[in-house]
Amino acid sequence: MSSVRRSIGSRLVLERSDFPRLLEGLGIRGYVTVGPVVRDGAIVYGPISRVEDLPIGWTDRQEAGTYRLERRDDGALFGYTVGPHSWKKYLFPAHERLWTAERSPEGFHILPRSEPEPRYAFLGVRACELAAIRIQDRVFDGAFKDPGYHQRRSEAFRIAVQCTQAGNTCFCASMGTGPRVEADHDLALTEILTGSAHYFLVDVGSERGAELATDLPLRPATEADIRAVDDLLEKTTASMGRTMNAVGLRDLLLGRPEHSRWTDVGKRCLTCTNCTLACPTCFCSTTEEVPDLDADRVERWRRWDSCFTLGFTHQGRTSVRTSASSRYRQWLTHKLASWHDQFGTSGCVGCGRCITWCPVGIDITEEVAALRKEEPVAVSAGGTR
Amino acid sequence: MREFAAELATGTGDPGPYAPFPHRVISRTKETADTTTLVLAPVGGGKGARFSPGQFNMLYAFGVGEAAISMSGDPSEEGTLVHTVRAVGNVSTALSRLGPGDVVGVRGPYGKGWPVDQMRGKDVVVMAGGLGLAPLRPVIYELYAHREDYGRVEIIYGSRSPAELLYYDEIQSWRTRTDTRFQVTVDSADRNWYGDVGVVTQRVPDARFDPARTIALMCGPEIMMKLSAQALEARGIAPSDIWLSMERNMKCAIAQCGHCQFGPYFICRDGPVLPYARIRPFLAVREV
């Protein structure tokens, strides 16, 4: 096995029976491995200490407003798509202390950050999720660096998994983010189950990945293995449950703030914030000031916020967006249009979480298709420009 | 800000861009019933951060929280920061109650200010409504300090009532200068008021400027700015020469928290001062 070359670009094969060695290798290197686990009737992300923690033999069935776990008839480790969690819960935690301050003769001083950041290994990162991390990098790791995010992000070991099946709410192919893993992975796995064979094609994506691979019993991939992967990815692309035409969306959405579809979706939207919490790129947050009892020590916490809340944007004491339609418009227009102005990319990766986890099944691809329809001038003339 | 951050990082670990820096309140002036001006200096001395007129800081009341407040002082003065605060929410109320010797946290300066470089050699129209005068005062200091660098200068300041006028004595002294017209108007007043009554937009038709070479600056309630911009545009000033200072709540001031978005713009990063030409489409839509 030592004769097999392990370097960036290497394509190797890991047998399913040797998969525990991968987890051991991560553990030896001090990583806290997190990945998919079954909890509360869904596949979410949590700590992984052994291969049996993974959702072996499970799959998910998703539709607008629906998510169900089902048994597979095989022992696949990654035979499902994305669940309600995303890796942002580790990189941009839902609740995080930004600093602690103590009263002092000089007024107050900021205490050093004492707790070290965990070194995560992310196991099972899908192509759309790598794209989502790249998008959040532009928010938290750009001109102003969030020190916690920056450290967690640069330390995190990323073991990607290529999707060998698409969900009914998936549309990564439309957004150009998947299903093939092309960048930002340390290792990328493709799970192959044929007859009695069960193995992983391993693509080495980084020096770190190559280094970890030295611990693994690997054989070089054959032409047949590579063809099997290509066939699987082709099948995934072809079976994508949703499509969205993202061409020219920026101008289209910013130019149609008075489209009647906003009113229509506003009647269905509960402004529950589920879509923003499930979204792997939504980054809005608020802060909380937490003083201790004698108010000599204060902690500043940041927690996820959502543009669907009434108080999210206000002038003085007056909410700027009182109607559900204006809040949905803010979310969708930000995600698909103004994100381009702000961060040079769409804010949508096509993972479909907002569709699946919307309690009333609002489908972003359907809303976009409706907003694309021109309206008679009389309707939109109430307006703008 | 960067220098500040580097200074603080020494020996204390990296607080990131979110840590406020202690400043002491040097003096406090009560402007109106609910509005207070604080003069701040960095604890431990030092020159403090320089700012451009129109920029803002995040002010922090210990144990209460932060609010975005524009600088309202003279940008050429080193060592102190001046902020005018209206008590509206928890944070601004706590800030308003601070007095000399108290400590307040400051981080900044943030945002893009008034287009001072573009103003040189041109006529300047300044329109302020209510507390909107505060972010304009730094640029007014600049106009008066280098008066010869500018053409005609018209300042129009409107307030709801005489009792709500800010910087009263200073305005009285500015109004004695003959090289600049500084008009003050109030929405309503009793018989003790000898000045003008009416809204700022009514002053636009007879304002003196050459529309082809004028920069207009405005800050105030959104409806006041919208109507003022329309009035100036009607007089021939190009929408790209009309600049508005926008206000939205914000938590981070560095385009990370999402609260202050206005159309595609982060008010904290792309603003608060933005040209009318760019934001007009969004001002025309309800609940943006």
Image (cartoon, rainbow, N blue to C red):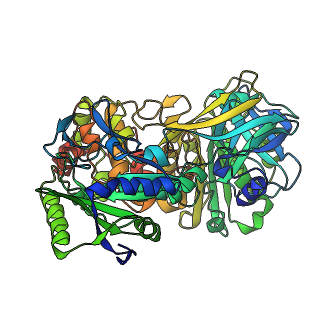
Q: Which of the two residues, B53 or A97, is positioned nearer the viewer here?
A: A97
Q: x, y percentage for residue B31? A: 77, 32
Q: Which of the two residues, B112 or A148, is positioned nearer the viewer here?
A: A148
- Count of all numbered marks drawn on residues in the image: 0
State the image quarter where residue A127 is shown: bottom left
Question: Residue, x 38% and y 61% (percent of image)?
Answer: A345
Residue B118 appears in the figure: yes
Q: x, y percentage for residue A380? A: 23, 45
Left or right placement of residue B20 versus residue A211 in this view: right
Residue A177 appears in the figure: no
Question: Residue, x 59% and y 57% (percent of image)?
Answer: A144
Q: Which of the two residues, B171 or B207, is positioned nearer the viewer here?
A: B171
State the image quarter where residue B190 is shown: top right
State the image quarter where residue A22 is shown: bottom left
Work out which quarter of the rendered image holds the N terminus of chain A and state it. Answer: bottom left
Left or right placement of residue B21 versus residue A265 in this view: right
